[in-house]
Amino acid sequence: MTEKNSSNAQTDRVFATERLPTAFAFDDQVASVFEDMINRSVPGYSTIISMIGVLAERYCGAGSTIYDLGASLGGASFAVAQQLPHNDYRIIAIDNSAAMTSRLSAKLDALDEPYPIECRHEDLRDSKIEDASMVILNFTLQFIDPAAREALMQKIYDGMRPGGLLVISEKIQFPDPALNELFIDLYHRFKETQGYSKLEISQKRAALENVLIPETLATHRERLNGAGFHSVDCWFQCFNFASMVAFK
Ligand code: GEK
């Protein structure tokens, strides 16, 4: 079995029936439907994942160490592994949800030909980053306490090789309130086109309140530049979702 045909993702119905408001968590229920959930909830997710592989091919030569922080089920790690033309690399995939890491470990164990992906169950705020050619934060920073984001970004910068690449994808907000509202509204329309009901959309939105905390592109840029990164810019954006590159 290869990773490409190993997916038997179940349909996300986590917010389909009325429920008491509870904060969103990456628990067993979410992990069991995660591939379907993220594909139907993040516009451009599959493009972003494929392009992370293409970016890795450019920046991860022989001897590379790649960190996938907040790896979930390893979507970005597998894209990198499938795209790299050599085997002389290692990917360290980190997540603090046991529901995610147990599933990712099982996926890795089920491969016929193993990839050099090491799955670690830890809080990325405590993780050591060393000699990284590439660091991936694919829709993860948004779940970290904003007060901890600057120190995390500095740790990542300090743990990277000169010339290394950071890819950071986030839900973003806009300083122009009208544009912000428009993009949120269009995003909800997108979710309806993906088969989510208005109840599902509103219950998930409420659950993510104070759990997923988006920032503006300007805030991201400022923090990344402050940590020492250069050539910081967006390479993908769709409504209120964006992915940026930053170089050491
Ligand atoms: C993908 N990158 O498919 N330490 C470690 N992991 C964390 C922490 C933390 N402090 N906080 C949150 N997470 C993936 C998708 S999902 C994005 C990333 C989403 C983990 C959390 O457990 C979850 O698995 C992941 O970050 C965010 O490319 O669901 O929108």
Image (cartoon, rainbow, N blue to C red):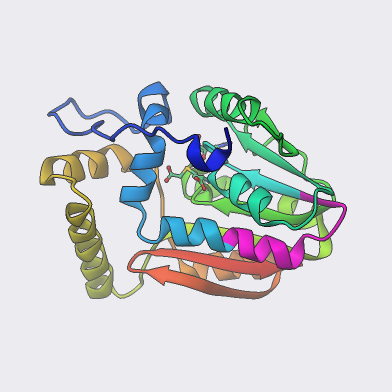
Residue 182, compared with residue 122, is above or below; it is below
Q: Residue at x 34, y 33 (%)?
A: 24
In the image, which residues are magenta? Answer: 52-65
Quarter the C terminus occupies: bottom right
Residue 170 x %, y %: 47, 57
Q: Residue at x 32, y 41 (%)?
A: 208
Residue 90 visible in rendering: yes
Residue 132, compared with residue 44, is above or below; it is above
Residue 117 x %, y %: 71, 38
Quarter the N terminus occupies: top right
Judged left or right of residue 17, residue 32 is right
Residue 216 x %, y %: 44, 66
Of residues 104 and 150, the one nearer the viewer is: 104
Q: Residue at x 53, y 49 (%)?
A: 141
Residue 188, compared with residue 33, is above or below; it is below
Q: Quadrant of residue 57?
A: bottom right
Residue lying farthest to the right in this orientation: 63
Q: Quadrant of residue 172?
A: bottom left
Q: Quadrant of residue 101?
A: top right
Q: Residue at x 13, y 44 (%)?
A: 197
